[in-house]
Image: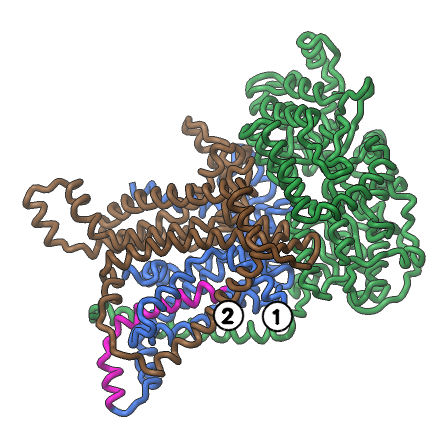
Chain colours: A brown, B blue, C green
């Protein structure tokens, strides 16, 4: 019941895998080649063409033009990308802090722990689209319950979806609502694996609670935290469903994320060549970030 | 504190459930109606079942089940192979994991063009195949963890007794890993069940999964919130029940085996 | 070492039997799925439960009952086979159900395929790109007629029009000239005459105490606003806080003088109402964008002020439905809306202000001493036969039946959202939802007026991209993110990029063709 990655990665490896082992892996490799690598190559090719299906189905070779345009002449794309990263940093940060806090609370519960964990799983399991459709109701300013309740307690709720300085945080709030319990559950599972005797010793030595948390708990949870950061940041970077349903990218461009912008270019405007180039730029950035995180993870575990 | 947190996380879900019993007038009234008159009146549910919602639920069920079965078929042997033989070393394993991280919007357009050429757009197959991109890597990593936890002695004993490797896998390891495989199946099912973007790209009208149907509902002129509430409840009920039944493994699954709850 | 302790493993083994059952269920379902889709996806949206086709927002029985009193032609031509129609889902698909028995009589099995309102274009475009032969008849927004017709997705209807006359001369001029044809051929028949209309609270405007207060405040009589400046002034006048008086009654919630379409997507059309009335048009004859001109900036600033000074606080989240509710739930004094909203406003089951609404031309802009009013014609619906249709003649006949033979019913019933587009439809007796003939006449006079002042969407290929770029600029300004000159300047730049990207020479030719129609209609000089 510990962080098992450590275990998996440090197991001594057999000298050579038998043919049988390769045969077992083959289907997966073939499937992934077909459904991910082939499309990726296909779209890499596409990204060097002008392919505007509103105009004509004929593709014209344009070399790096699409990339040059995206990088140098498309501030809208960069703003969208920036917004996605902003959501990632803020979202992961908030979810981690709240999640850890909740985990500490949960870990002190006795028998109720498993019930609370079960209930907390509910938001995690809901389709993001369903979260968004209900978001429309809950955040509605004229007849939604949230601002009514806030009014009742004397707080004046903001215009959640119709204010450009708030809307992005509303999208974020939906994500925080859905995924903080997930982080909390992971962290509380992690907390239970910490060695109780070491804590006892430290406490006898007069360490403060905060000191214990900082010098013991956090470092011990670090591998878990890195895994969580990796999973959550990749998911938040993909934020699309809630934007599509709740705001359509507005007000102004306040909630236009990179995923949503790519969707517009691809399936609204049918600029397939350009959409492919934009996708590739995102993919490159994500790969770099993910590689760094994964390396961190492997190092931390090895 | 914990009660407040639970309220924060659960009240919106309860609100959805209450909305599913409201009339259109009750939805729009101010102050909001908290306890609808027609509570326990399942009109919205029956009209959902009779109309598009019923089809959507069926489509989602078909896609998610078939994709899950296929993901297991492909992924479980690989998981075993990684666990026992470390085929390809860490690189292959991490390559597979990294595919799970791809934003779907990147593969959506190529898949659209590919399926156009293969004539698969707007069929069950389009989604069953497309969802392999995230579910196969998931199954591989998750089930690998379960195989890692199983002692090798039994398999080795069987091999000494003259069984071949396949028999050791199918007859012993697979049987022991059933709980893990079932959890993997349930979570893969949930991932497929909840997916929206690829479904939006790759299907149009013949196939329409629940998330797409939900988004359709709010796009129209006359937004029937009661029915939306009902469909939402129908959409989340199965996955929530599954999650509760296998709570402990779900935590492990959602972290790709990094945490054993 | 294995991480699961012995005790744990036993616990894990317990759900094994349950697990086996679940696994078996998954396999069975998967087999069923594969079998089902191998059958070729020929599933019809027929619901076995209700016994009705799965489209529209009523049961087939209700739909047919709805038009029971409408006399239908005794003789219909004979066809055979299936006609598949694709359109935006919800109540506007009901027309295909109203006339279900007629399709049957003509030997046609009609199949309806619904897609979301916002994605109708993308879904149909995808269908065309995929090159399927699955759809015979498409309902689409005429802004895309350039895209669809010039790419060869549609079948010219000229021959069929000779065979079964759809009486196009009866179609209101703007619609006929702008939205049905492309490059000399007719490709579409009208189904829905969407155009903006101005709607206001007649009871409040005529209220004596409001009249007196307005006169005192502004030194002139309170009348229906003729210009956008007056619109703003009247809007500000009627904006009240909770607790204030309105028409002699104390308000329990705030009341607002204006409402706009503030959501991303169509907010640009509310800007174009203003800009077009000042003589604005999208491009000049060389495809130079004109949307960053001083007149455009002034128009957009007017809309921004309306949003900021006299609209509800969540107006930037208002789409069609919220903007409609704002009016008919008595939260706003005046709105510009599609022409079906007065019908909803007259319906006591939906409206709190039935009998209290007035309708008219949109406010305008004073150009050379004369006030010019323009009404955007956003969305709208037309019917066209696909190039790949295997049953084109039957598909055309269905379109023609809806567009002509029984069209007055389709556009007057509150059971759908379709709006008038023919002169012959504008008769008070068809519009029974209005309580009095006078009210119906006022509505129809207004509809006729706004249709005659109709201003089209961009409707050359790339419309979706041009409109999105403009909408982004409009939305940035009304949300206070950027100033009008900056945002519209950027939009003009984006338009140039789009034009270059698509092929400037080709786009220019198409646009000049469009401009000829604008001129013929007197929309520009």
Percent x, y of residue A277: 54, 53
Give yes or no for residue B159 being in the magenta stretch.
Answer: yes
In the image, B1 versus B114, the foreground residue is B114
Verify CB contact (< 8 Å) between mark 1 and mark 2: no
Circle 2 marks a residue in which chain? A
Circle 1 marks a residue in which chain? B
Point 62% across, 23% down: residue: C305
- Examine the image and state in which quarter residue B93 appears: bottom left
The residue singled out by tag 1 in the image is B118
Q: Which residues are magenta?
A: B131-160
Instruction: Say if labels 1 and 2 share a chain.
Output: no
Point 51% across, 67% down: residue: A38
Point 53% across, 55% down: residue: B197
Percent x, y of residue A155: 42, 28
In the image, B10 versus B105, the foreground residue is B105
- Examine the image and state in which quarter residue A11 appears: bottom left
Is residue B47 at least partly visible in the picture?
Answer: no
The residue singled out by tag 2 in the image is A34
Percent x, y of residue C353: 69, 29
Q: Magenta region, mostly helix, strand or loop?
A: helix
Label 1 CA crowd tier, 10 Å (few <14, some 14–19, many 20+):
few
Answer with left or right where residue C360 lies relative to residue A95.
right
Label 2 CA crowd tier, 10 Å (few <14, some 14–19, many 20+):
some
């Amino acid at each position: 019941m510990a962080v098992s990655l450590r275990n998996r990665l440090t197991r001594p490896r057999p000298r050579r895998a038998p043919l049988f082992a390769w045969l077992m892996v083959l289907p997966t490799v073939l499937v992934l080649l077909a459904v991910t690598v082939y499309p990726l190559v296909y779209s890499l090719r596409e990204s060097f063409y002008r392919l505007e299906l509103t105009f004509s189905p004929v593709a014209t070779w344009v070399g790096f033009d699409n990339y040059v345009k995206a990088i140098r002449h498309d501030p809208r794309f960069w703003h969208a990308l920036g917004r996605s990263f902003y959501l990632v940093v803020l979202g992961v940060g908030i979810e981690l802090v709240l999640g850890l806090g909740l985990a500490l609370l949960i870990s002190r519960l006795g028998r109720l722990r498993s019930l609370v964990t079960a209930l907390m799983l509910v938001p995690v399991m809901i389709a993001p689209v369903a979260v968004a459709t209900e978001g429309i109701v809950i955040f509605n300013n004229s007849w939604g319950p949230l601002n009514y309740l806030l009014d009742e307690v004397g707080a004046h709720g903001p215009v959640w979806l119709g204010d450009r300085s708030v809307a992005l945080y509303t999208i974020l709030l939906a994500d925080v609502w859905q995924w903080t319990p997930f982080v909390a559950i992971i962290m509380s599972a992690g907390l239970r694996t910490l060695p109780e005797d070491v804590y006892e010793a430290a406490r006898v030595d007069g360490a403060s609670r905060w000191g214990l948390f900082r010098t013991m708990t956090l470092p011990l949870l670090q591998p878990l935290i890195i895994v969580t950061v990796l999973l959550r940041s990749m998911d938040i970077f993909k934020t699309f469903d809630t934007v599509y349903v709740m705001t359509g990218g507005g007000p102004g461009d306040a909630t236009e994320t990179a995923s949503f912008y790519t969707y517009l270019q691809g399936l609204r405007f049918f600029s397939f060549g350009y959409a492919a180039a934009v996708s590739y730029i995102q993919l490159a950035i994500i790969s770099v970030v993910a590689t760094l995180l994964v390396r961190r993870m492997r190092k931390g575990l090895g | 504190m914990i009660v407040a947190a639970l309220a924060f996380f659960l009240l919106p879900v309860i609100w959805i459930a209450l909305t599913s019993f409201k009339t259109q007038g009750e939805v729009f009234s101010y102050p909001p109606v908290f306890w609808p008159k027609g509570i326990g009146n399942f009109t919205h549910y029956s009209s959902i079942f009779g109309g598009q919602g019923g089809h959507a639920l069926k489509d989602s069920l078909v896609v998610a089940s078939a994709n899950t079965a296929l993901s297991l078929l492909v992924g479980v042997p690989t998981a075993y192979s990684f666990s026992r033989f470390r085929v390809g070393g860490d690189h292959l394993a991490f390559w597979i994991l990294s595919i799970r991280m791809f934003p779907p919007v990147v593969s959506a357009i190529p898949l659209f063009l590919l399926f156009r050429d293969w004539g698969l757009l707007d069929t069950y197959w389009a989604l069953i195949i497309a969802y392999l991109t995230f579910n196969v890597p998931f199954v591989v990593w998750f089930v690998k963890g379960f195989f890692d936890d199983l002692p090798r002695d039994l398999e080795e004993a069987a091999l000494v007794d003259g069984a071949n490797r396949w028999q050791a896998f199918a007859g012993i390891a697979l049987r022991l890993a059933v709980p893990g495989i079932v959890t993997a199946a349930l979570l893969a099912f949930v991932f497929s069940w909840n997916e929206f973007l690829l479904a939006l790209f790759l299907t149009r009208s013949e196939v329409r999964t629940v998330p797409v149907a939900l988004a359709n509902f709010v796009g129209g002129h006359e937004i029937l919130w009661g029915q939306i509430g009902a469909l939402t409840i129908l959409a989340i009920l199965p996955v929530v029940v599954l999650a509760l039944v296998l709570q402990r493994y779900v935590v492990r699954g959602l972290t790709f085996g990094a945490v054993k709850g | 070492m294995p991480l699961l302790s012995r005790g744990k493993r036993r616990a894990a083994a317990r759900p094994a039997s349950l697990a086996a059952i679940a696994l078996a269920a998954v396999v069975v379902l998967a087999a069923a799925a594969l079998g089902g889709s191998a059958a070729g996806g020929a599933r019809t949206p027929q619901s076995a439960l209700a016994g009705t086709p799965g489209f529209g927002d009523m049961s087939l029985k209700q739909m047919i009952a709805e038009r029971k009193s409408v006399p239908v032609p005794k003789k219909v031509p004979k066809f055979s086979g299936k006609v598949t129609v694709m359109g935006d889902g919800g109540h506007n698909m009901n027309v295909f159900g109203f006339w279900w028995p007629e399709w049957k009589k003509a030997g046609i099995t009609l199949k309806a395929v619904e897609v979301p309102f916002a994605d109708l274009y993308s879904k149909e475009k995808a269908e065309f790109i995929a090159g399927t032969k699955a759809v015979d008849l498409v309902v689409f927004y005429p802004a895309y007629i350039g895209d669809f017709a010039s790419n060869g997705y549609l079948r010219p209807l000229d021959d069929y029009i000779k065979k079964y006359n759809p009486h196009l001369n009866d179609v209101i001029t703007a619609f006929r000239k702008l939205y049905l044809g492309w490059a000399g051929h007719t490709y579409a028949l009208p189904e829905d005459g969407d155009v903006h209309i101005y709607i206001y609270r007649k009871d409040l405007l005529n209220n004596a105490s409001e009249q007196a207060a307005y006169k005192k405040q502004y030194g002139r009589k309170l009348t229906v606003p003729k210009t956008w400046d007056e619109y703003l002034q009247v809007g500000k006048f009627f904006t009240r806080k909770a607790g204030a008086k309105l028409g002699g009654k104390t308000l329990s919630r705030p009341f607002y003088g204006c409402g706009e379409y503030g959501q991303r997507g169509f907010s640009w059309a509310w800007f174009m109402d203003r800009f077009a009335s000042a003589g604005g048009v999208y491009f000049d004859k060389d495809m130079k964008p004109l949307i960053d001109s001083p007149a455009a900036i002034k128009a957009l600033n007017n809309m921004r002020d309306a949003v900021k000074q006299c609209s509800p606080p969540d107006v930037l989240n208002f789409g069609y439905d919220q903007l409609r509710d704002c009016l008919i739930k008595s939260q706003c004094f005046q709105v510009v809306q599609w022409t079906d909203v007065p019908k909803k406003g007259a319906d006591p089951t939906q409206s709190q202000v039935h009998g209290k609404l007035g309708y008219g031309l949109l406010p305008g802009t004073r150009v050379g001493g004369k006030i010019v009013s323009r009404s955007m014609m956003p969305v709208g619906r037309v019917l066209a036969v696909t190039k790949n249709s295997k049953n084109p003649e039957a598909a055309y006949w269905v379109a023609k039946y809806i567009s002509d033979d029984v069209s007055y019913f389709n556009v007057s019933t509150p059971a759908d959202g379709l709006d008038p587009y023919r002169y012959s439809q504008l008769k008070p007796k068809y519009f029974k939802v209005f309580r009095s003939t006078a009210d119906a006449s006022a509505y129809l006079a207004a509809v006729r007026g706004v249709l005659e002042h109709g201003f089209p969407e961009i409707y050359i290929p790339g419309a979706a991209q041009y409109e999105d770029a403009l909408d982004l600029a409009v939305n940035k300004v009304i949300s206070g993110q950027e100033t009008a000159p900056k945002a519209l300047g950027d939009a003009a730049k984006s338009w140039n990029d789009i034009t270059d990207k698509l092929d400037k020479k080709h786009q220019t030719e198409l646009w000049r063709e469009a401009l000829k129609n604008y001129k013929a209609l007197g929309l520009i000089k």
